[in-house]
Every structure is written in C-alpha cells, then in structure tokens.
Image (cartoon, rainbow, N blue to C red):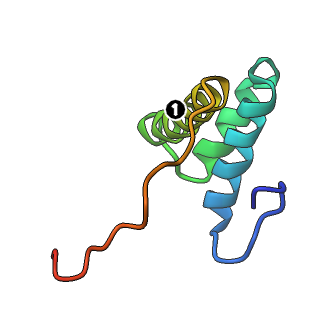
C-alpha cells in the first residue's frame, strides 16, 4: 500500500478513501468537488473524511518533525506479558 498499490482486504469505499487521502497528500490543490462527491457516493460523510485526512496529515507532520529533528528510536522492545 505504501508504494501506491491497493491491496486486497479493502472495500471499494475504503479504496476510494485511501485514494483521496493520497491525492491530498501529494497535492491538496488538485482536490476538486468531484473528489469529495465520489467519497460521498461511497457513503462517507464529512466527519469520516475529516477524520481520515486528520490522521494522515498528523502522521505526515509527526514523520516530518522526527526526520527534521533527527529523532532516533531509542526504545527497546516492550514486554507486555502478563500486563493485560
């Protein structure tokens, strides 16, 4: 999925949402009303569209910040055995 290919296991509606979020991530200026109308045709409402965008954009922000600040993963493996 990361390479831009849709994998099995997603519904047609989910594939449409992923394609929309990818389009926004590449160039948000290219989003048109027809893109939003397509999502709504698949049953997505404004709250779900905003949530999907928010999660994707928050992830992009976090990754950009981590790369710019040269954050390194310094956490060891977590052992949750017996925790839950």
Expressed as whole percent of the image width and height from the top left, the position of residue 66 reads: 58, 32
Q: Would you place residue 29 above or below residue 60 in this image? A: above
Q: Where does the C terminus fall, quadrant-wise?
A: bottom left
The answer to whether residue 59 is left or right of residue 26 is left
63 in relation to 3, above or below: above
Q: Position of residue 55 (x, y in %)?
A: 50, 39
Q: Residue at x 64, y 76 (%)?
A: 9
Q: Nearer the viewer, residue 13 or 69?
A: 69
**Residue at 41% across, 36% down:** 47
How crowded is the residue under tag 1: few (<14 C-alpha within 10 Å), some, or many (20+)?
Answer: few
Residue at 52% in and 38% down: 49
Q: Position of residue 50 (x, y in %)?
A: 49, 33
- The answer to whether residue 27 is above or below residue 74 is above
Find residue 1 and report its horizontal and vertical position in percent: 75, 61
Residue identifier under label 1: 58
Q: Is residue 76 above or below residue 82?
A: above
Q: Quadrant of residue 57?
A: top right
């Amino acid at each position: 999925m990361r390479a831009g290919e849709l994998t099995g296991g997603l519904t047609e509606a989910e594939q449409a949402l992923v394609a929309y979020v990818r389009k926004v991530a590449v160039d948000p200026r290219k989003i048109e009303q027809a893109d939003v109308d397509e999502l709504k045709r698949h049953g997505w409402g404004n709250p779900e569209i905003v949530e999907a965008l928010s999660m994707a954009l928050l992830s992009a922000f976090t990754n950009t910040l981590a790369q710019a600040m040269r954050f390194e993963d310094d956490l060891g493996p977590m052992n949750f055995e017996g925790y839950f």
